[in-house]
Image: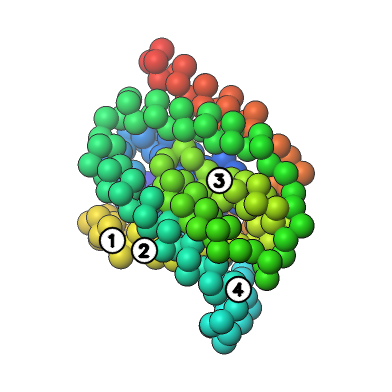
Amino acid sequence: MQTIQAVLLGIIQGITEWLPISSQGQTLLVMMSWLDISPEVALSYSLILHLGTMSAVIIKFRHEFIEMLKNLDSNLTRAMIISTLFGGITGLPLYLLIRETFTGGREATIIIGLLLIATGLLLRSQRSGTKDIDSITIPDMVLLGLAQGVAILPGISRSGTTITVLLMRNVRQDVSLALSFMISVPAVLGAVIIDHSYAALPIGTSATMLLASFTAGYLTMDLLIKFARKINFSKFCIAMGLLTIVITVIL
């Protein structure tokens, strides 16, 4: 992979991570359809890209993370722990399944298209609530974790799914956004611990991707989060999914 391609992938990840349109689905489509990268290698690169945006989240919400570590009895800490544990219940089996079955480029692209459509349909149900972080209940945390685990599927937006679940549980939109991004940190770290396939990737390419996704993600986070609050991405995901399927079938 050329350096410019690695940088562009990092920029795509850094921008789409904050929008409910599945950053993983978008980067996998680019890698498999345009760069002719195998699904297995593309998934490994995707993990590197997520490490970059995860680092941006840690820096952006550093005060919240520090406060959480100082007060281990807080509701935010409970939400992080419970959602992570239950995320593993759905996420780990699906992640292992993807690693075993996500091998056919054409079939994989169609699956991503279908899951983008599913994300679009899910986003149609978004509505704001009234709960703050201290009012979030254990059932809310459990459902949040299960939703994040399911969102491991390429094409299912992790942020879109988790934010929608929180809004459906009557959580305020700003709280939903912040919590959705914060719980992505242990999820990505868990994937790094479980999946070591990224270790076989070229170090230079991986470093370039990570730096590009971190930089783009950190610089665009605030702007794109504000943009995401005003725009309904349901139609975009459905149209993108249909277009992906049609192009794949024709070609």
Mark 1 vs 4, N-terminal side = 4
Find disc 3 in the rendering and name its residue. Answer: 161
Find disc 4 in the rendering and name its residue. Answer: 75
Query: Where is residue 185 shown, x and y percent of the image?
Result: 48, 65
Can residue 181 be seen by looking at this rendering?
Answer: no
Q: Nearer the viewer, residue 124 or 50?
A: 124
- Report whether 111 appears left or right of 195: right
Number of marks drawn: 4
Question: What type is the residue that disc 1 sits on?
Answer: Ile
- Residue at (43%, 46%) from the top-left corner? 150
Mark 3 vs 1, N-terminal side = 3
Question: What type is the residue that disc 3 sits on?
Answer: Thr
Query: Where is residue 19 shown, x and y percent of the image?
Result: 61, 46
Q: Residues within 10 Å of mark 1 (few under 14, many from 20)?
A: few
Determine whether label 4 and label 2 are within 8 Å by CB. Answer: no
Mark 4 vs 2, N-terminal side = 4
Find disc 1 in the rendering and name its residue. Answer: 194
- Residue at (68%, 41%) from the top-left corner? 126
Between label 1 and label 4, give the one nearer the viewer. 4
Determine whether label 2 and label 1 are within 8 Å by CB. Answer: yes
Disc marking residue 190: 2
Seen in the picture, residue 179 relative to 90 is either above or below; the reply is: below
Determine whether label 4 and label 3 are within 8 Å by CB. Answer: no
